[in-house]
Amino acid sequence: MIPESWKTVSLSSISTVNGKYGANASACEFDKDKPRYIRITDIDDNGLLIPEGKVGAKIDNLNEFIVEKNDLLFVRTGSTTGKCYLHQESKGCYIFAGFLVKFQINKNKAIPYYIWTLTKGNSYKKWIQIMSVRSGQPGINGKEFGEYKINLPPLPEQKKIAEILSTWDEAIETNETLISLYEKYLNSLALSLVKKKILINENVWKQTILKDVFYDRKSYGCQSDNLKLHSLTIEDGVTAKTDRYNREFLVKGDSKKYKIAKLHDLVFNPQNLRYGAIAVNSIEHDVLLSPIYATLEIKDPTKYDIDYLGYLLTSKEMISFYDSIAEGTLVERMAVKPDVFLNQVFSIPDIATQKKIANILNTFKKKIYLFKKNKAELQKQKQGLMQRLLTGKVRVKLD
């Protein structure tokens, strides 16, 4: 039951442009000097425009596909169907791609930011799940988006709710900016200290082959109450298995054996190492991983520090290096086998210097962790506010 003063309207009834499809441009037409061409892949999971990788495109009838400030763009096909972007850029010319549809909100009826915020709520997400089901590729067309029903309060109440939620958005964005800045600085500092040996005594560094540092521990076990199956992801390292990565329903029987990973193991996926599938396991108890992964343990912790080696072997520079040593007849099957990995030689300092470098870098890593933790808490708070404010369960006081 919605409040008496609220109305249930369709998206098309509050828009002056309804479900306009974007322009199609082939890759050969991309030109960085042309207007920014917004594609599905340019919109992140939060519905924000990714700043990196800006690409322009030469488009006929340019004016027909221009994106103006406060326009809403919806993804209409593919695995991210329903994702919504609110264009807030006031400078530069932007055009949008064919797999996006545009709605231009009538500002006399609704506030664009308010409508965009609704697309973050559970009601909209459930609608997307139901509507996007197809026999093949998921998708929702422009007309169907226009029929989406919205419980809309009067404009003054929309404005007040938008102001409240935007405060949380600004705080979340501040944390995201700090995370990005600290991560870039950490990567740069790690490269300077670990690879270029800036400000470090050269005499303590020795050429060292990795097979003298690690051994490939091949311990196996089955799933149990004490041993749970985990994933190795490029984004989060070793992490609890989610539905996204769960394929266990394809496995018959319960006796399949998995690799056991221990705290401080260096873990990597031979097939995806060149894409960044490598991490130091930070989970304190033993976990299970796919048997295709390599689990490396330090032979002598009195000589080698896992934090230092983690910074060395998981850096962006090293990810590029792994691509150069991958082997295989087909590109999609190229891999870095554990024995090849362990035969690589690096300049590594004594244990005291390793720990000194690791302590410096860990200081920044801890700050990044705190920013991420704060961001997650803010997102949780905002989600709770949305559930109350956007449904009318809690009313705002108007000035």
Image (spheres, grey):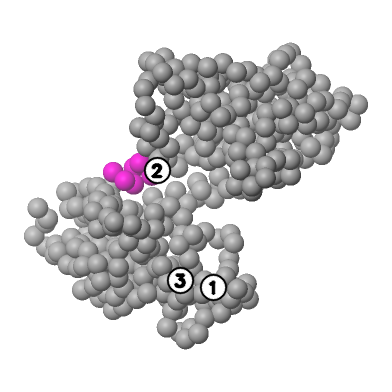
Residue sticking out furthest to the front: 329
* Left or right for 77, reference 59: left
Residue 34 or residue 336, whichever sits in front? 336
Front disc: 1 or 2: 1
Q: Is residue 388 left or right of residue 38?
A: left
In percent of width and height, residue 257 lies at 47, 20
The amino acid type of the residue labelled 1 equals Ser
Q: Which one is in front, 290 or 159?
A: 290
Q: Which residue is mark 2?
A: 378
Residue corresponding to mark 1: 26
Residue 382 lies in the magenta stretch? yes
* Looking at the image, residue 183 lies above or below residue 266: below
Residue at x-position 46% and y-position 55%: 44
Amino acid type indicated by mark 2:
Leu
Stretch in magenta: 377-384
C-beta proximity under 8 Å, tags 1 and 2: no
Among numbered discs 1 and 2, the one appearing first in the sequence? 1
Number of other residues with Cα within 10 Å of mark 2, as a class: few under 14, some 14 to 19, many 20 or more: some
**Residue that appears at 35% across and 64% down:** 76
Q: Residues within 10 Å of mark 1 (few under 14, many from 20)?
A: few
Q: Judge left or right: residue 326 versus residue 20.
A: right
Q: Quadrant of residue 111?
A: bottom left
Q: Was residue 332 drawn as part of the magenta stretch in this picture?
A: no
Q: CA distance from mark 3 to mark 1?
A: 10 Å
User: Where is 70 relative to 308, above or below?
Assistant: below
